[in-house]
Image (spheres, rainbow, N blue to C red):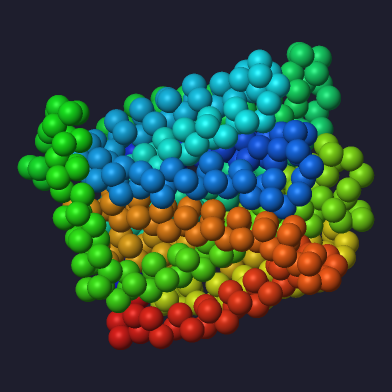
Amino acid sequence: MPHRSGHFAAALSERPFALFVAGQFVSQFGDYLAQIALIAVVGVYTTRAPLAYSQLTVAIALPALLFGPIIGALVDRRRKRSVLMAADGLRAVIIALIPVSMKITGSVLVLFPLVFASFLLGLFANAARYALIPSLVPPSKIFAANAVMNFVNKLAGLLGFVGGGLLVVGGFWRGLRLEPWEAGFYVDSLTFLASVVTVALLGVREHFQPRERESNLKELWLRRIRNFKEDQRELLALVRAQPMVRFTVATLLLVALFGGTLYPLVVVIVQKGPQVAIGGDIATHKVGFLGGVLAVGMMLGSLSVGFLGHRLSRRGLVVAGLCATGVLMSLFSLSRHYWEFLPVAFLAGFFLSPVMIAQDTMLHESSPESIWGRVFSGRDIILNGGFMAVSLLMGFAAQLVLPLLGTVNHERVALFWTGAFLAVLSLLAVYIGRNRKA
């Protein structure tokens, strides 16, 4: 029988966790505003070709590939609460610098190093956020806590995407001498500060192993360099020893396959659609609204799995959700009108949300507490690395390769076959780690 981890509402009865959720909701709301602002500003400064959006993924994903293992080990050796506060405080400054720097230079090139720095700090925040959850709830409520975090993330996505789309077409910002996309970054900066305040109010005890008590930063980094290979061997040993960890790693790659299509294919398809491409601001607003519909689906998926998921097989949730998502990607590519995109996006969100909740819970349940920071940092490496690789591949294929083959609707062709590929691979994932029940 699957391990019971409590019900959705039970986690919120823990007051420190409820406060934590409130702060992270505000912060993630701002993140989604900033994503729409990024789409808008790239559209303003470039031609909206698939490769233009693919290039943005390099700045987003590269930090995880370069620094993920080091960051995970550093988080394991520090107080997660302090790490989260420092990361969000610095992100507030960096995000506010994006519109200022672009106004001064008049170039999109300054965007990429600032996005890189923001997502580098995001690695610290993400590893600390998930490693902190077990300190806020008892073990029996970890599954429910992950469901709550996933739910509020999608609620923030709904409000952030729709609100971000409205910001992009909000002419009233110009009365303040601001471009609409600038406002998204400034609001995001304020939400990071709200996260810092709520995390500062948490009263939580974190238990440290003796090796995690270094106070000298130089000593810590020297130790990190000496122990880098040992840490990676520890993670690889966990993957080899735990079938559920192997299964989770494989299916994280499939989630990245889905995510890598969003910027170069889905965004471009929506913006090029005959019912959408009626102006840059309006097109971006439609992208934001579609993202809100996706978030509604993910939110309801989180609710359903939060109440019922503890009765179901983790692996079954992942396989079924990924297979359905792949089929829906192919259906999206066949849709010809904007209104047809909406139910497909809703269902994709509904099926994908339980996948991510189950994956996070399997990582918590299959790995020791002492390496949770590295485990979730490793998860970010897989997701971000896969996201970057797939996005660049899709942008390259849609803009350069498929036209040489004489195809039309290149983004739609690439999305259709990627969805079919995802559905098939998800079914094959059944055979990974099947000797143990999730």
Figure disc tally: 0
Q: Position of residue 438 (x, y in %)?
A: 35, 75
Q: Nearer the viewer, residue 281 or 54?
A: 54
Q: Is residue 301 visible?
A: no
Q: Residue furthest left?
A: 210
Q: Nearer the viewer, residue 351 or 213?
A: 213
**Among the 4 quarters of the image, the one containing residue 173:** top right
- Which residue lies at the image location 62% right of the left edge and 18% below the top edge? 100
Residue 245 against residue 135 in the figure, above or below: below
**Among the 4 quarters of the image, the one containing residue 234:** bottom left
Q: Nearer the viewer, residue 392 or 75?
A: 392
Residue 198 against residue 126 in the figure, above or below: above
Q: Position of residue 157 (x, y in %)?
A: 61, 46
Residue 78 against residue 102 in the figure, above or below: below
- Which residue lies at the image location 14% right of the left edge and 40% below the top edge? 223
Residue 379 horizontal side relative to residue 166, left or right: left
**Among the 4 quarters of the image, the one containing residue 176:** top right
- Quadrant location of the N terminus in the rendered image: bottom left
Q: Position of residue 174 (x, y in %)?
A: 80, 18
Residue 32 horizontal side relative to residue 359, left or right: right
